[in-house]
Image (cartoon, grey):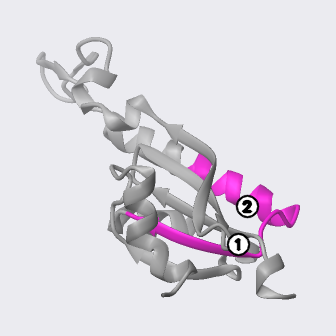
Amino acid sequence: MPIERRTIWLLVADAARASLYTVDRRARRLVELESWADDAAAGKGQDLVADRPGRTFDSAGQGRHAMEPTTAPKTVAKERFLAMLAGHLNAAAKRQAFDELHLVAAPRVLGELREQLHPTVQDRIVSEQAKDLTPLGQAELEEAVGKLFWPS
């Protein structure tokens, strides 16, 4: 398939925000397809818990103590957000919505996201950058990743 006709997607993500773009090579710009934000994953862990932790009795004796959650609430929110992103990409690859995928994500997020991607998505990944570019505006993002899509 000619390069001009390939559908190229760019995902820019961190643990709580993500934007999906399609690359318009002729116009030399990115076109935003979707964006997501998870307030729970972005917030403080203590803000995610509504009340004091429950209490339980000691295994021996009459004492009581607070029960700690097995996983931090913020970690759970981040995992849920990344699972949603991976599910979206997996479904899109299944319906052949894109030919190439470029991932730009915070280092830990990139590794955790990659683990959840189906092999059909992984086969279409052309490049990965372990950088958090989510705070950038459209023009700054195009400048930062433009070398990938429209070399000078």
**Residue at the disc numbered 2:** 90
Q: Residue at x 33, y 24 (%)?
A: 48
Q: Is residue 148 magenta?
A: no
Q: How many marks?
A: 2
Task: Categorize mark 2 by other alpha carbons within 10 Å: few (<14), some (14-19), many (20+).
Answer: some
Q: Residue at x 70, y 72 (%)?
A: 121
- Residue 82 higher or lower than 145, as above or below: above
Task: Categorize mark 1 by other alpha carbons within 10 Å: few (<14), some (14-19), many (20+).
Answer: many
Question: As shown in the figure, which amino acid type bears the numbered disc 1?
Answer: Val
Q: Which secondary structure lies at badge 1? A: helix
Question: As shown in the figure, which amino acid type bears the numbered disc 2?
Answer: Asn
Q: In front here: 82 or 35?
A: 35
- Answer whether residue 10 is visible to the viewer in this image: yes
Q: Quadrant of residue 78?
A: top left
Look at the image and give the residue range highlighted in magenta.
83-105
Q: Quadrant of residue 53?
A: top left
Q: Is residue 97 magenta?
A: yes
